Image (cartoon, rainbow, N blue to C red):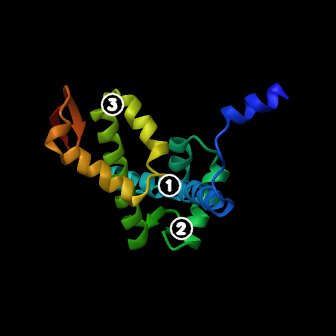
Amino acid sequence: MLRNAKDKRNTTELPPELTQARRFGKTRSAQSRALLEDYVELIADLLATSGEARPTDVARRLGVSHATAIKTISRLKREGLATGRPYRGVFLTDTGQALAERTRARHRIVVSVLVALGVPAEIAEADAEGIEHHVSEATLKAFTHFLQTPGFQRSSRKALHPSGTSQSRTLA
């Protein structure tokens, strides 16, 4: 009896079923979309730096097997985000390129907020890889507002602007 009373004091009420289901559904959808976003962002980077994005290069850089990269690239093609040319690798469609640019901008914003909060740049980059896919548009707007607000200044740190350029920021 005492244990049950103690358990009740330490628990919080669950949200309504539909609310909780919507939250979990949003997370599952973001996880599925995150994979595609990582691939298009990397393909765009490879195309920009070397002029080609071979499945082998994609697999190596993402740390997955060649078969996994081929399977996901096939999904990108089915969803209209990429095209392939025999013996030439993978290319992004306009839709794929736009997704890569949005993903990169989101990544820059998340990194900038983490750095502004005092997270070392290398850790902020790694953490942003997971966070960027789960942040809503409302949260991104709040992050951007935070970064643009002069009053958030706490100590001197270098933060990355969403465009990817380095800017000096003073943080309190």
Residue for point 51% across, 74% down: 80
Mark 2 / mark 1, whichever is N-terminal: 1
Q: Nearer the viewer, residue 153 or 76?
A: 153
Q: Nearer the viewer, residue 4 or 60?
A: 4
Is 135 on the left-hand or right-hand side of 62? left
Name the residue type under label 3. Answer: Ala
Q: Quadrant of residue 101?
A: bottom left
Report the disc number at residue 39.
1
Residue 147 visible (yes or no):
yes
Q: Secondary structure at mark 3?
A: helix
Where residue 81 appears, as percent x and y from the top left, is 48, 69
Q: How many marks?
A: 3
Where residue 30 appears, as percent x and y from the top left, is 55, 57
Name the residue type under label 2. Answer: Pro
Name the residue type under label 1. Answer: Tyr
40 w.r.t. 66: above or below: below
Q: Quadrant of residue 166?
A: top left
Distance of mark 3 from mark 1, alpha carbons? Answer: 23 Å
Q: Report which residue position mark 2 lands on.
A: 86
Residue for point 33% across, 30% down: 121
* Mark 1 neighbour density, 10 Å: few (under 14) some (14–19) many (20 or more): many
Distance of mark 3 from mark 2, alpha carbons? Answer: 39 Å
Mark 3 / mark 1, whichever is N-terminal: 1
Q: Secondary structure at mark 2?
A: loop
Report the disc number at residue 121.
3
For the N terminus, the quadrant is top right
* Mark 3 neighbour density, 10 Å: few (under 14) some (14–19) many (20 or more): some
